[in-house]
Image (cartoon, rainbow, N blue to C red):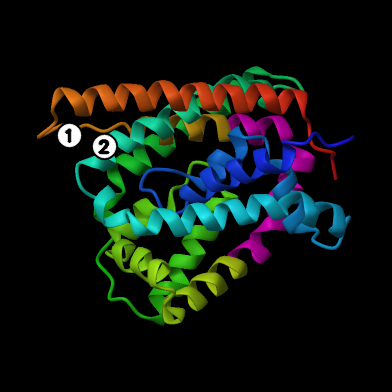
Amino acid sequence: MQKRPGDTIFRAVKGALIGSGFILPGISGGALAAVFGLYERMILFMANPFKNFKANFLFFLPVGIGALIGIFLLSFVISFMLGEVENVARWFFIGAIVGTIPTLWQEAGKHGRSKTDLGIMVTTGVLMLLFLWFGQPLFSTMTPSTSAWLLSGGLIGLGLLVPGLSPSNFLIYLGLYKGMSDGIKTGDLSVLVPLIIGLLAIVLVFAKVMAYVFEVAYAKLFHAIFGIVMASTVMIVPLDYTGFTIWHYLFAIALLVLGTWLGWWMGNLEQKVKPTTI
């Protein structure tokens, strides 16, 4: 299919939002990749990197560049985001996910939808909600080290492969979140190198597993993804509004509307500009 002029920029914007999912608490890069229509092709590419390598590389290059820009820029403001502004900014991402729900629902049912699929969707959604809600006491604070950053990279890789899994949540639980964002901001190789190694190791090991599941149980997998996305979206809704003024609320509402429109627009445009399948 012939590419439209804005397609590359469109994918770069998606990449920037997906990249933010690797570093912003409560957001899943894999979930954003799913709602933006990139998840399936991304998994198949990672599982079979040499199959149609040139076409896939060129397709994902702007996504990757956008993701790196999103991660890098967000790392500069992460300390600020950990304050009260985080509760305002989260509403933009909630809106972005809500706006793409119709697209994800359509994607999940494009090969049919059974009662079993709906049961899987509800079950995975409830289990993920319970896990995210009660999971924090299972983790203890870790001391920043090479092994800790390898683990952090592995968690980011899982966040890419498993939609709804927010690596930043776990990094906060482990006490590694601030150190990771500072390392990215300053270009600290002692942080960046093990992060990248851990990420690549997890992706290389598990990408083929996810690709196989796509082949044998597409509808069930995507309905499970839908349930996970819903659960993770509920979990990022801010509950503490201490110190908020009327301007904070108005700004949060404006970001929610903007995010919803952007998500809807991207999902709607995705239906018109479908990427070439692998």
Residue 109, how many percent across, how many down?
70, 22
Q: Is residue 208 magenta?
A: yes
Q: Is residue 57 magenta?
A: no
21 left or right of 120? left
Query: Rounded to the nearest whole Å, what is the CA distance between mark 1 and mark 2?
Result: 8 Å
Residue 44, above or below 143: above
Q: N-terminal of the two: label 1 or label 2?
A: 2
| Nearer-the-camera pick, 277 or 2 | 2
The residue lying at 21 percent from left, 29 percent from top is 248
Residue 184, how many percent across, how many down?
42, 67
Residue 74, above or below 227: below
Label 2 element class? helix
Which quarter of the figure has residue 244? top left
Residue denoted by label 2: 87
The residue lying at 31 percent from left, 69 percent from top is 179
Residue denoted by label 1: 240
Q: Which residues are magenta?
A: 202-224
